Image (cartoon, grey):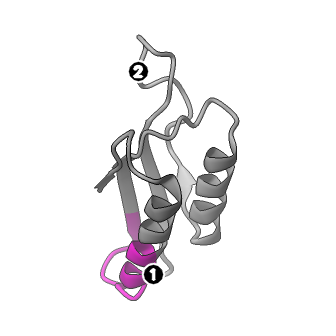
Amino acid sequence: AIYRSLNSNTDVTLLELNDIILLNSTLKTASYKMFLGDLNIDLIKHSKIREEYLLAMAQFGFASLINTITRPMSNTCIDHIFIKTVPC
């Protein structure tokens, strides 16, 4: 799981996320991997950071399980769950 505050640099967060996924990519102990996060990146609103984030996750084989509003008061989807099926 990962958290990014609203004030932190999104480019740095994406680089750190990339490093975390690469580090964990060598683990082959489960038939699936989950990534949970509150990155304060809205998956509903189209933006450059959203596109970069989704592309990075897709490049590592992760698919989003949540694509609807997770914060009704702000109409945003900033709570994320991604899953990757790992070949056995």
Find disc 1 in the rendering and name its residue.
22
Which amino acid, mark 2? Arg
Look at 43% across and 13% down and name the residue there.
72
Q: Residue at x 51, y 80 (%)?
A: 87
Quarter of the rendering occupied by the N terminus: bottom left
Asked whether the beta carbons under mark 1 and mark 2 sit within 8 Å of each other, the answer is no
Secondary structure under the numbered disc 2 in the rendered image:
loop
Q: Which residues are magenta?
A: 19-33
Residue 21 percent coordinates (x, y): 43, 74
Is residue 84 depicted above or below 25 in this figure? above
Q: CA distance from mark 1 to mark 2?
A: 30 Å
Q: Mark 1 is on which residue type?
A: Leu
Verify whether residue 23 appears in magenta: yes
Q: Position of residue 12 (x, y in %)?
A: 46, 64
Above/below status of 83 relative to 59: above
Where residue 9 sits, quadrant-wise, is bottom left
The structure residue drawn at horizontal position 50% and vertical position 24%, both measured from the top left corner, is 76
Q: Identify which residue, 7 or 85, lies in the foreground.
A: 7
- Vertical placement of 72 versus 59: above or below? above
Q: Which image quadrant: the C terminus?
A: bottom left
Furthest-bottom residue in this view = 26
Label 2 sits on residue: 71
Mark 1 and mark 2 lie on one chain; the one further toward the N terminus is 1
In the rendered image, the vertical position of residue 60 relative to residue 52, given as above or below: below
Residue 40 position by quadrant: top left
Mark 2 Cα within 10 Å, few/some/many (few <14, many 20+)?
Answer: few
Relative image position of residue 22 (x, y in whole percent): 45, 81
Residue pictured at 61% horizontal, 30% vertical: 44
